[in-house]
Image (tube, grey):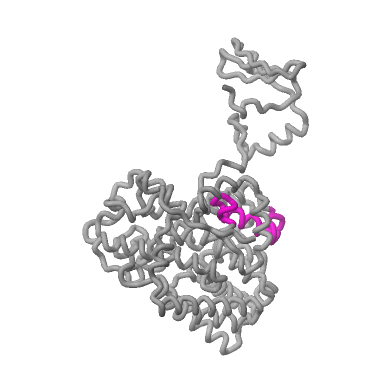
Amino acid sequence: MIPYATCIRFGTTQDWIVCKGAHRRVVVEKSENGIVHVKVSECKEETSKKSVALTQSEYNLLQAVDIDGRPLSTAPFLTLFRRRDKQPVLQPWRHLMNILDDSYHGVSRCLLGQVDRWAFNTFALDVCSGGRCMPHLLVHLFHQYGFMSTFNLDVVKVWHCFNLIDAGYHSNNPYHNSVHAADVTQAMHCFLRQRKIGEHMTRVEAMASLLAAVTHDLDHPGVNQPFLIATSNHLAALYKNFSVLENHHWRSAISCLRQSGIFDHLETTVWDEVEEHIRSLILATDITRQQEFLSRFKRYLENSVLDMAEKEYRHFILQIALKCADLGNPCRPWDISHRWSLQVCKEFYRQGDYEKRLKIPVTPICDRDKTTVAKIQTDFFKFVVSPLFEMWHQFLETPLTVELLNNLHLNHVQWEKMVANDDTPSFETDLNAPLASEEEEGDLEDEQVLPPLLQHTATDSSWMDEPLGKWARRRHSMPLSLPKPFGARLAAHVELVISV
């Protein structure tokens, strides 16, 4: 059988000749009646070296492919489209998967047409794009903002960069995955469109803000900073227990940008500005610094000094915007906000299970035996989200911030009703429903052993002392799940209603 790629040729000759080695040749001929004949015969060395005349357009194409003086590749042609190796974070019913064609981008384009709306459903885009919502969203936004032409970006390098970032997110994380990154990026986009922010913002600041949003949790291990410190993780030692995850995220982001070469053609000053913006914005998402930013924001508002024409204040507002985008799930419509609440609590409970097995103190909100989803959410809404978004509304005062506060209030009321009714069982049912990624990579919940990197506590040894084995497939932080038995993969599925 001859691979299809070997039948690609230039020129206009009647026979397609494919020569393998110096002794065999394959000739594909098409007769007048349309029958294709394949002949295998001895191949002389001089025949294999026979050149094919190229047209001027074909020659120009080959010259364009010859990058940095490297020899032209003789391998089969590759395209940006490849077989999907990912699954949506939320798995629809199996009988619906047969009617979803993720190679047809019409539905995705329809959803991306609503990207300016705050009620944008990232889960729906994730399903329609076959688990690749983040690259699709970023490429769409880069075209919408005109970054491709403004910065003369190579579309191949752009796709390569976003594919690297997409692969850097752990798909077995219920919450900190590429869908969360896409959701935060879409929220950041909504904020950048506000007149008070956009009228003075430069093109570099806008692009760096979107890149910071999409990489703000890059390579997140699915556990928080205290867990990494308690288990003597190498990241905690590397960053000296200070903003451990955020320092790792922004450095991982810069490594993806450099590896893809997306900005290699830009001047050094522009590249340095992009890097500094990404670093500063991602570091601002550290939740332990929340009170620091709120106090500063409150002081600026009281003194009315936030002049967006000044770079210092403009950058601070972009930091607040990214914090709001990162914590914006409670302000989404109820169906979207509710799903995100279940996802984040599932990740909390998973960490609590790790802590119990490692015999280290269990984080209070991660103990599934002592708290409920509704209780976690009501406290989070009241003490973390509400103070931030009230100040955000005080600064912007736009229909968008009014919508955010209305959604926040309605969602808070819903959770308070559930706390009052002690409506826990139904949430546990939703919470234990498997993710599509867990069907592929497994979940620790049904396993009897911990991953190699979690089998020792901090008093025994450091994670860095463990042999990596098959876990070395990631460059930095490590996955925290083991494969499930096949039978466990056939668990119940989560129904997702896609509303366009």
Q: Against 256, is 76 above or below?
A: above
Q: How many numbered discs, if any?
A: 0
State the extent of the magenta-drawn residues as a range: 125-152
> Does 440 sit left or right of 464 as displayed?
right
> Does 317 sit left or right of 146 as displayed?
left
Image coords of residue 485 (percent x, y)? 35, 45
> Does 471 sit left or right of 266 as displayed?
left
Image coords of residue 28 (percent x, y)? 67, 18
Q: Residue at x 67, y 68 (%)?
A: 202
Q: Of all residues shown, which one is farthest toward the bottom?
A: 303
The chief SS type of the magenta part is: helix
Q: Residue at x 51, y 52 (%)?
A: 93
- Residue in front for this viewpoint, 228 or 401: 401
Query: Is any part of residue 365 visible from this angle?
Result: yes
Screen quadrant of the N terminus: top right
Q: Of all residues shown, which one is farthest toward the left?
A: 460
**Does the magenta portion include 121?**
no
Image coords of residue 141 (percent x, y)? 65, 59
- Residue in front for this viewpoint, 493 or 313: 493
Screen quadrant of the C terminus: bottom right
Quadrant position of residue 69: top right
**Does the magenta portion include 136?**
yes
- Residue in front for this viewpoint, 203 or 140: 140
Image coords of residue 186 (percent x, y)? 60, 64
Quadrant position of residue 343: bottom left
Query: Is any part of residue 45 visible from this angle?
Result: no
- Residue in front for this viewpoint, 354 or 160: 354
Q: Against 172, is 289 above or below?
A: below
